[in-house]
């Protein structure tokens, strides 16, 4: 596994407002991400800009403020809730005299901590190395400018070429291994297709309660926790809907705003389960004030992986927090569009099974369902 960078144990978080309508939610989410990485947030620096500064992203004055806060709090790392260019990251580290991490690197680090399966670890390492490759090439362009013939080439240029070659070889090896894993997954998928069993994938914003719901309906023991990206590895289980009907249900990695493209690309093999599904259970935290934006972000990633045309059933989860009743919601034509449930208490799960069966057009006696 590629070595995780040392984030330190105390961090200053930097969040700049470029005119986003939900800036406060973005700040809160970033703080949760940092804590999820096992780092203490000892200060949050906010600011407002029209556009990023080319050299320091935050501007000279704001960077001085960040430096003073870092010194006052004795923080070992500064974490930006934004994607930084290699040059900006290098300039910030020189100015602040500490390690600087951007949002993409932070999410990659969390993924590195949470990956449990062999495939998940391969995917995370591939994303890390491809991210590092951009830092290596763009961050060290001064070394590329060194010219010279035999005996005159500088050690910096030689080392850069060596690093590139080693990185390239490792990336190729990881892609080959993942291709083998994907072939195995395709064999398993074809086996399921021959049996005619319908497949359902659980998708949603990170921490919406997908794994808790998965465990509740399938009696599985997938790891579930109240933290961002608790689940990275896709898990599939058979779910009996009553009568002779059964389906395959898959739990998937949670989505988040501005999910690094390298991660979406690396996890494409895992997300194939989503693309191949007959129905998507789009789990939404109904207690979140930002639920509509979260739905948009999930749909954006689904579109990127080619799963936007698959039928969706919205699952309003965590109704126990607001004291709502379990129910099935239908449109003006009587079609099911959503189900209100609590994965934690189990309220509404029998309605969810009924809704899945109806959406998949599976004949199912209601009395059998209620006793399943």
Image: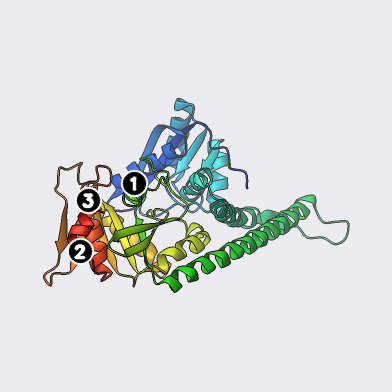
Of residue 162 and residue 138, the one placed in the foreground of this image is 162
Q: Which residue has dot 1 on it?
A: 212
Residue 273 in percent (x, y) is at 44, 64
Q: Which residue has dot 3 on it?
A: 341
Marks 1/2 in contact by CB < 8 Å: the verdict is: no
Distance in Å between CA atoms under marks 1 and 3: 12 Å
Q: Which secondary structure, mark 3?
A: loop
Instruction: Give the residue at x 64% y 54%.
Output: 136
Discs 1/2, front: 2
Instruction: Give the residue at x 39% y 53%.
Output: 254
Residue 335 placement: quadrant? bottom left
Q: Which secondary structure, mark 1?
A: helix
Q: Is residue 121 above or below residue 175?
A: above
Q: In which quarter of the image is the C terminus?
A: bottom left
Q: Which residue has dot 2 on it?
A: 365
Residue 138 placement: quadrant? bottom right
Circle nearer the N terminus (1, 2): 1
């Amino acid at each position: 596994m590629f070595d995780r960078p040392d984030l330190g144990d105390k961090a200053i978080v930097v969040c700049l407002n470029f005119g986003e309508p939900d800036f406060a939610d973005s700040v809160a989410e970033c703080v949760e991400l940092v804590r999820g990485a096992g780092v203490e947030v000892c200060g949050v620096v906010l600011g407002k800009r029209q556009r990023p500064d080319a050299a320091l992203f935050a501007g000279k004055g704001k960077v001085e403020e960040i430096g003073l806060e870092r010194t006052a709090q004795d923080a070992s790392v500064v974490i930006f809730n934004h994607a930084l260019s290699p040059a900006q990251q290098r300039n910030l580290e020189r100015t602040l005299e500490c390690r600087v991490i951007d949002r993409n690197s932070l999410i990659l680090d969390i993924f590195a901590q949470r990956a449990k399966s062999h495939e998940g670890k391969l995917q995370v390492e591939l994303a890390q190395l491809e991210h590092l490759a951009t830092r290596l090439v763009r961050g060290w362009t001064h070394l590329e400018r060194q010219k010279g013939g035999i005996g005159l080439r500088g050690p910096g240029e030689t080392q850069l070429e060596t690093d590139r070659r080693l990185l390239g070889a490792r990336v190729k090896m990881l892609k080959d291994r993942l291709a083998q894993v994907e072939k195995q997954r395709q064999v398993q998928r074809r086996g399921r297709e021959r049996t005619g069993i319908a497949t359902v994938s659980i998708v949603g914003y990170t921490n919406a309660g997908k794994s808790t719901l998965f465990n509740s309906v399938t009696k599985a023991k997938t790891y579930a926790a109240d933290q961002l990206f608790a689940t990275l590895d896709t898990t599939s289980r058979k779910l009996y809907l009553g009568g002779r009907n059964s389906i395959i249900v898959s739990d998937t990695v949670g989505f988040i705003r501005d999910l690094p493209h390298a991660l979406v690309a690396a996890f494409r093999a895992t997300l194939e389960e989503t693309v191949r599904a007959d129905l998507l259970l789009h789990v939404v935290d109904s207690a979140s004030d930002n639920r509509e934006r979260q739905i948009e972000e999930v749909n954006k990633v689904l579109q990127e992986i080619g799963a936007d045309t698959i039928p969706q059933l919205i699952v309003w989860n965590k109704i126990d927090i607001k004291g709502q009743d379990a129910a099935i919601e239908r449109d003006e034509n009587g079609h099911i569009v959503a189900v209100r449930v609590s994965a934690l208490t189990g309220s509404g799960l029998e309605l969810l099974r009924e809704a899945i069966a109806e959406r998949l057009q599976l004949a199912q006696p209601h009395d059998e369902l209620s006793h399943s």
